[in-house]
Amino acid sequence: MKLSVIVPVYNMAADGKLQFCLDSILKQTMSDLEIIAVDDASTDDSYQVLLSYADRYPEKVKVFRNSENKRQGGAKNEGLKHAGGEWIGFVDSDDFLDSRYYEKLLQKAEETGADVVGTDYTLVSKQEFMPGKTVANNSLQQCGVLDEAKHKDLVMRPGSMVIKIYRRELIYDNHLDFPEHIFYEDNCAGTVWMLYAKHFEKVEEPLYYYYQHDTSTVHTITEERCRDRMKAGELLLLETKARGFYDTYREEIEFRFIETYYVTTVFSYLSGAKRISLSFLNELRMGAKAYVPNFEENPYYVNQIGPEERKLLHIQQKNNTCFLLYYLGLKWYRKLRYRK
């Protein structure tokens, strides 16, 4: 088997989302593939939909089910137990693929000898093959045989995992997997996996259709999901230390931690949470300082976080209450100016 496509599934039966995703994989021009679909204890008809596909395409579709909901990371890990392909890919069960997607990625791998190949994706709000806004993932500067400089760049911006294929040996020889029971599992796994890659290449086309809808993870901000992002940041530190990468890529890893655990979480929480908890904001403040005491001196933090965000977070590091009052006042002032 050339390729295993792992599809984690949770409550995607409505509106034909799951069927559209599976059909796009089955219609690939590259036919030597298997679909490893893992139902993550869905409460709708997703499992029945998967079983119907396994009945119709027994040579192509294998279905497994988690007895408890382990989130996408747990479903992907279950899929990895059963994947037999020389290459491994992942597809979110509400997204879909250009029919040439895997053919083009595998052709690039064969031409170059890469062990990871990626592409770009296009944002869509309908289940149709009409490209929307193209989002570039990774850059050509990151491609080729990977030295320390390229790995540093990939630590900073590893790109999405669903728009990549990975050579089997990369995953299994290095005992790679995903964090379970949290959202944002790729924030940890994506970086760690790329640190083991020896050669990365990219197809410069938006071949993956990223379907955005109201229940997407990126559109839902709760304290629980913020805590999951914090956990992903913590796991990134722990994994890179345990695997011997931390000392070589310390500045890059610490920035990624601060960006994930602290900066992104603070501002997404403030902008999207229905109720703001001062104690939760203080927990974020204290956690960032405990893990990386001098993060404000990190060169990536200075150069890549905007001056206004750095000013606000500096205020928070001094006084959490003053920070929240200042932020809310600034938000009110801008809303008032916008109305004028």
Image (cartoon, helix red, strand yellow):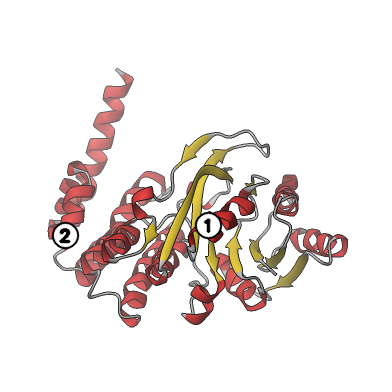
* Number of dots carrying numbers: 2
The residue located at (35%, 80%) in the rendering is 243
The residue located at (36%, 70%) in the rendering is 236
Disc 1 is placed on an element classified as helix
Asked whether 107 or 118 is in front, the reply is 107
What is the quadrant of residue 299 in the picture?
bottom left
Asked whether 191 or 220 is in front, the reply is 191
Asked whether 113 or 257 is in front, the reply is 113
Q: Amino acid at mark 2?
A: Asn
Drawn side of residue 257 relative to residue 29, left or right: left
In the rendered image, which residue does mark 1 sit on?
Answer: 111
What is the quadrant of residue 326 in the picture?
top left
In the rendered image, which residue does mark 2 sit on?
Answer: 298
The single residue placed furthest to the front in the displayed view is 111
Disc 2 is placed on an element classified as loop
Drawn side of residue 261 relative to residue 248, left or right: right
Residue 335: which disc?
Answer: none
Drawn side of residue 271 relative to residue 48, left or right: left
Q: Say few, some or many: other residues with alpha carbon within 10 Å of mark 1 (under 14 / 14 to 19 / 20 or more).
A: few
- 3D distance between C-alphas at marks 2 and 1: 39 Å
Question: Is 238 drawn above or below residue 339 in the view shown?
Answer: below
Question: Where residue 118 sits: x, y (%)?
Answer: 49, 54
